[in-house]
Amino acid sequence: MNSPGNTQTADQVKSTVEKPGQIGPGKTWFDPYAFMPVTTARFGRTGRNLMRGPGLVNLDASVFRDFRLSEGWTMQFRAESFNVTNTLAFMNPGTDASVRQMEPSRT
């Protein structure tokens, strides 16, 4: 583009953007066909930070207990667990309108 240091935005071609909310490889969080890339020397019509990805929730737990052994000596029991619910955290969806997912061919 003719404006170094700036980020290009796409043009929104549908009045509303459907959000199927599918997560994982080959799935879409929002409708990629609601946007078109800008191919001329101009900025797109969409604003910045228009879409939000799936939220991230992480649950960590810990238990601590101090035992006094004698004057000046303390022993600590510690148990920690990270990501207790074992929930996957995928990256936010791509924001490049010029890269669209290909639909599987039907033969």
Image (cartoon, grey):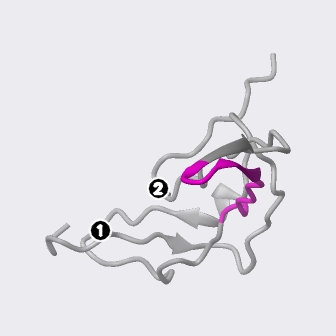
Residue occupying the point 67% across, 45% down: 76
> Is the N terminus in the top left, top right, bottom left or bottom right quadrant?
bottom left
Residue occupying the point 81% across, 49% down: 22
Q: Quadrant of residue 12?
A: bottom right
Q: Quadrant of residue 105?
A: top right
Q: Secondary structure at mark 1?
A: loop
Which of the two discs, 2 and 1, sits closer to the camera? 2
Q: Dot 1: within a 10 Å radius of its alpha carbon, few (fewer than 14), some, or many (20 or more) residues?
A: few
Q: Quadrant of residue 25?
A: top right
Residue occupying the point 49% across, 83% down: 47
> Does 95 appear above or below 84?
below
> Does 26 appear above or below 63?
above
Looking at the picture, which amino acid does disc 2 mark?
A: Asp
* Residue 19 percent location from the top left of the image: 79, 64
**What residue is disc 1 on?**
40
* Residue 14 percent location from the top left of the image: 69, 73
In 3D space, how far apart are the residues under numbered discs 2 and 1 (Cα atoms)?
16 Å
> Does 3 appear above or below 34?
below
- Sooner in the amino-acid sequence: mark 2 or mark 1: 1
**What residue is disc 2 on?**
96
Q: Is residue 90 at all visible to an observer of this figure?
A: no
Mark seen at residue 69: none
- Range covered by the magenta-colored residues: 53-73
Looking at the picture, which amino acid does disc 1 mark?
A: Thr
Q: Is residue 35 at all visible to an observer of this figure?
A: yes
In depth, the one of 59 and 39 nearer the eye is: 59
Q: Dot 2: within a 10 Å radius of its alpha carbon, few (fewer than 14), some, or many (20 or more) residues?
A: some
> Does 100 appear above or below 34?
above
In depth, the one of 103 and 28 nearer the eye is: 28
Residue 50: say if magenta: no
